[in-house]
Image: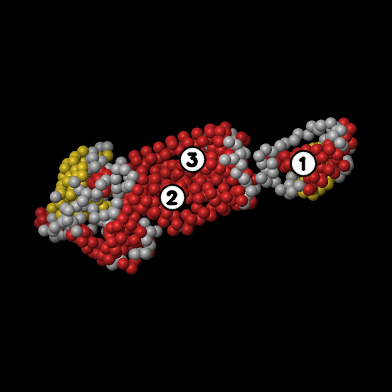
Amino acid sequence: MNVIVAENLCKSFGSFKAVDRITFEVPQGEIFGFLGANGAGKTTAIRMFCGLSKPTSGKGSVAGFDIWKQPEQIKANIGYLSQKFALYEDLKVWENIRLYAGIYSVPAKEIGPKTDEILHRLGFTSERNTLVSELPLGWKQKLSFSVAVVHDPRIVFLDEPTSGVDPVTRRQFWELIYDAADRGITVFVTTHYMDEAEYCNRVSIMVDGKIEALDTPKKLKEQFEAKNMDEVFHQLARKARRNGA
Amino acid sequence: MRCFTSWPARPGATELNMKQFKAFIRKEFYHIFRDPLTMAILFLLPILMLTLFGFAITTEVRNTKIAVYDPSKDAGTMAILNRMEASEFFEITRELSSPDDIESVFRQGRIGLLVVFSERFYENLVHTGEAQIQLLADGSDPNNASVVVNYATAIIAASQQELISRTGGAMPYQITPEVKLLYNPQMKGAYNFVPGVMGMIMMLICAMMTSVSIAREKELGTMEVLLVSPMKPIYVILAKAVPYFFMSVINLTTILLLSVFVLDVPIAGSLFWLIILSLIFIFVSLSLGILISSVVDKQLVALLISGMVLMLPVILLSGMMFPLENMPWLLRALSEIIPAKWFIMAVKKIMIKGLSYSSITRELLILGSMAVVLIAVSLKRFKTRLE
């Protein structure tokens, strides 16, 4: 079953086509890398999938819900994490988990076990009552991810989740992503780090609002005769006309 | 291939989800209780402001130094001077020996009032029923001068009554103007400041704190996460306002208790209507805060705007500190759109003058419509910004 379906999806701001007829599908449980230079239209596309903005034209569905007609249902069935923290620094670790569980209507009796499970998985059991402001950056990042999927969403959108994080923590973060994918959560991730692109099941590369390439990292490297994803990306991004718009 | 368990679709938020709402409000209270600065603003500021205005910054005139030129020195002048000296407002520090000293005594600037009696004061009073007293006040501070003159006139009037009764009522009625100070016979500053401070604190807590706390979520990026969540934006905003509403009610209680038991300002009218009035004003302030936060994205900007756009007019144009009557028409017109002005006016009527609710229907209507319009505009603004 496809968790994300986009068919000729467009978003224009005046005459500027931020997203220009993108078409793709993401099956359940996949880790889908959504790459592109700054201003390529990634964020605009994610906003449409998250029910934050309406497309100009085209069709699309997320978790089986239409992005035109059912944004509220979509919101209830997705998780979201951006490069900014979702966590409240003046709340304790368990309070943050309970807050988001509450916002996503996780039944009250499940919140306790869920909290224990998350803390156990992260190895945070002793930090239950610690204020988030006292946690190291990497820990916050991992906790943010766990909080973003506290309600077991169909899909989680990660918008540059690892920017500014050290390589060790990034590695651990990706373990969490694999873990979530193993539980059947589809992962839609944007990143600047091309080594991370290699971790994805499939990767799409956006240039000037269009998807220029979409395949597994292995096939993309063959197709572009490149040693790594970094080269693939640069061959495509070189064509870009707009920059950081 | 991996095997997935069945995936129950979660219902979308179409109506108010109380559990969600409660979870969010609880979080807001954590923010408030864990921030020492917020706590100080919420609980110490009202007490501080009220005591400061009530006791320290006072417009009351006490122990004004007066000089006297009394060529008569008879029973009549003595009666008046004794009374003045006995009152807590005046202190006779100089007696002039000649009218030539009058100008110099003011130039030295040490006295606030000069009392000049006519010659043969008591004789004239008894025989012709007329005697002159001249009151000269230092007009460089007009407010102060008028207060001092009012006090002095009141004292003279009282002495006159005494003189009349001493002569067995045989003396014809005197024409000295008697200035009666309605509602606030002792001209206590607290009577004026309590309603003003009430308006200021409500505005501060509701508008400033709400706008800053919403701007904070935007600045930190948590607002983005909340907007992606199934919680409807309108409930995010309402949940933000609820804790500050409670805080304002607590503050209202503190202020009223302080003013009754510490500042001796009684609640002369209906407590019920005073509370209704305050609640409407709280709504107006809350929606102003939400409106500000829908325009700005930074805490500091929210703070500055609430400070400049809300607090300053409340202090300057609400009639709390400076009488509106003396202002140029432009400022007076501007004051009409300041919610605090109407609130303070109405509080004075109900709390100090003890008038019935019918006297504040105009204020209630104006504040009520301000609340409706502001809430509508700010919610609409908030919605459109999301698209």
- How far apart in space, not on screen, are marks 3 and 2 (Cα)? 16 Å
Residue at the image position 41 percent from the left and 56 percent from the top = B30
Left or right for B82, reference B254: right
What's the residue type where badge 2 is placed? Pro
Q: Are marks 1 and 3 in contact (CB under 8 Å)?
A: no
Query: Between tags 1 and 2, which lies in front?
Result: 2
Residue closest to the eye, B161 or B121: B161
What's the residue type where badge 1 is placed? Ile
First-in-chain label (1 vs 3): 1
> Please, is residue B45 above or below residue A133 in the view?
above
Q: Which residue is mark 2?
A: B243
Q: At which x and y percent is residue B139?
A: 71, 40
Q: At which x and y percent is residue B108?
A: 76, 47
Q: Which residue is mark 1?
A: B155
Q: Chain of mark 1?
A: B
SS of the residue under disc 2: helix
Q: How many neighbours does mark 2 have within 10 angstroms: few (below 14), some (14-19), or many (20 or more)?
A: some
